[in-house]
Image: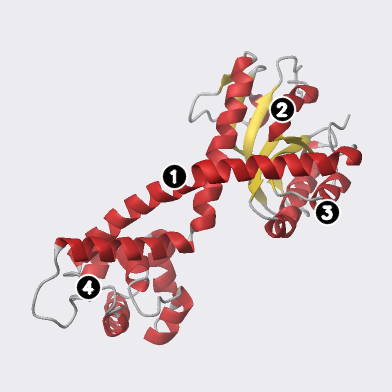
């Protein structure tokens, strides 16, 4: 039986309450989450400055030993360089730049001579474009003061955090949502599965729950098996042998645009889960923020139900 997806007359009021709840959280806690990340990032930037002689010595050897510094180097130029722009300017393989950016390492199978040449090209571009308004000591006889170094590191940290502001906020919101679900379940006698529990999602004992569990599914055609990450898996206390657990996806959004771009992701998960585990599978959403009627209608049409965070007690209506 549906809990919220079949009650469109309540959607408008719930949307308004959810938006208010998200905005209150954002104003109170998002700056703190962003600030904590910025402090750590500024410390990382200062470490990069020490490695590079405060941006006066960007040799291939330094990047070979510390490939993780590339994002800081990109943000230290005027203007800051996007990944693809750096690749084009330096005339290097996208493979090496994206490996340094995403995996914080150099490509394992790339020729060492080619790596050194690529890093030398990257270093020359960075050195030529270092922002003189941030690194005010470039070209002068006096070395930078501690105040100048800290100021420069803070500016670069702001640039780095600005480019990943949404993920920072989204991760903080997810942690809060999962903590809210955990508190609700534990208050009703549920216990969290031990960290590292390797049991399949449908083998959890009744009265237990787990976070970030992978569910194995076979793609259409039966040619390849993949895993679907599920935020929350709860086996109801009254579950019988071979009953499936409740699956929940924790979702938050700070605007209406992105939710409608991402709504197909849940529909695809539901289709794969049904194809592999039958029509009885329960895959639902835990929502906080900007989810409009278009989004809700789309999910309802795909057979996906939801619980609003401001009405978390609706979880009980799913048999918990």
Quarter-of-image position of residue 117: bottom left
What residue is shown at x 33% (from left), y 50% (from top)? 40
Q: CA distance from mark 4 to mark 1?
A: 30 Å
Residue 26 at x, y = what percent? 56, 45
Q: Secondary structure at mark 2?
A: loop
Q: CA distance from mark 4 to mark 2?
A: 54 Å
Q: Which residue is mark 2?
A: 245
What residue is shown at x 32% (from left), y 79% (from top)? 122
* Lower sequence index among marks 4 and 1: 1
Looking at the image, residue 99 sits to the left or right of residue 8; the answer is: left
Q: Which residue is mark 4?
A: 55
Q: Are marks 4 and 1 in contact (CB under 8 Å)?
A: no
Front label number (3 vs 2): 3
* Lower sequence index among marks 3 and 4: 4
Quadrant of the drawing holding the C terminus: top right
Q: Which residue is mark 1?
A: 32
Q: Are marks 1 and 2 in contact (CB under 8 Å)?
A: no
């Amino acid at each position: 039986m549906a809990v919220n997806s079949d009650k469109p007359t309540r959607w408008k009021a719930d949307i308004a309450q959810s938006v208010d709840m998200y905005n209150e959280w954002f104003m109170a806690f998002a700056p703190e989450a962003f600030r904590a990340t910025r402090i750590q990032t500024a410390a990382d930037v200062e470490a990069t400055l020490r490695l590079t002689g405060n941006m006066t010595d960007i040799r291939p050897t330094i990047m070979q030993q510390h490939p993780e510094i590339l994002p800081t180097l990109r943000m230290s130029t005027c203007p800051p360089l996007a990944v693809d722009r750096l690749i084009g300017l330096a005339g290097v393989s996208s493979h090496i730049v994206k490996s340094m950016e995403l995996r914080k390492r150099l490509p394992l199978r790339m020729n060492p001579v080619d790596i050194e040449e690529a890093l030398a090209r990257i270093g020359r571009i960075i050195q030529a474009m270092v922002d003189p308004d941030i690194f005010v000591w470039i070209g002068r006889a006096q070395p930078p003061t501690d105040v100048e170094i800290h100021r420069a590191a803070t500016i670069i940290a702001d640039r780095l955090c600005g480019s990943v502001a949404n993920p920072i906020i989204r991760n903080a919101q997810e942690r809060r949502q999962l903590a809210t679900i955990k508190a609700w379940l534990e208050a009703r006698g549920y216990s969290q599965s031990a960290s590292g529990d390797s049991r399949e999602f449908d083998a959890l004992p009744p009265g237990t729950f787990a976070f970030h569990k992978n569910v194995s599914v076979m793609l259409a055609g039966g040619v390849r098996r993949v895993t679907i990450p599920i935020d929350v898996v709860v086996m109801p206390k009254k579950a019988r042998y071979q009953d499936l657990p409740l699956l929940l996806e924790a979702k938050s959004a700070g605007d209406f645009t992105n939710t409608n771009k991402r709504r197909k992701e849940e529909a695809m998960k539901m289709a794969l889960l049904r194809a592999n585990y039958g029509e009885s599978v329960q895959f639902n959403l835990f929502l906080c923020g900007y989810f409009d009627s278009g989004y809700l209608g789309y999910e309802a049409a795909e057979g996906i139900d939801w619980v609003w965070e401001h009405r978390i007690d609706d979880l009980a209506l799913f048999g918990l």
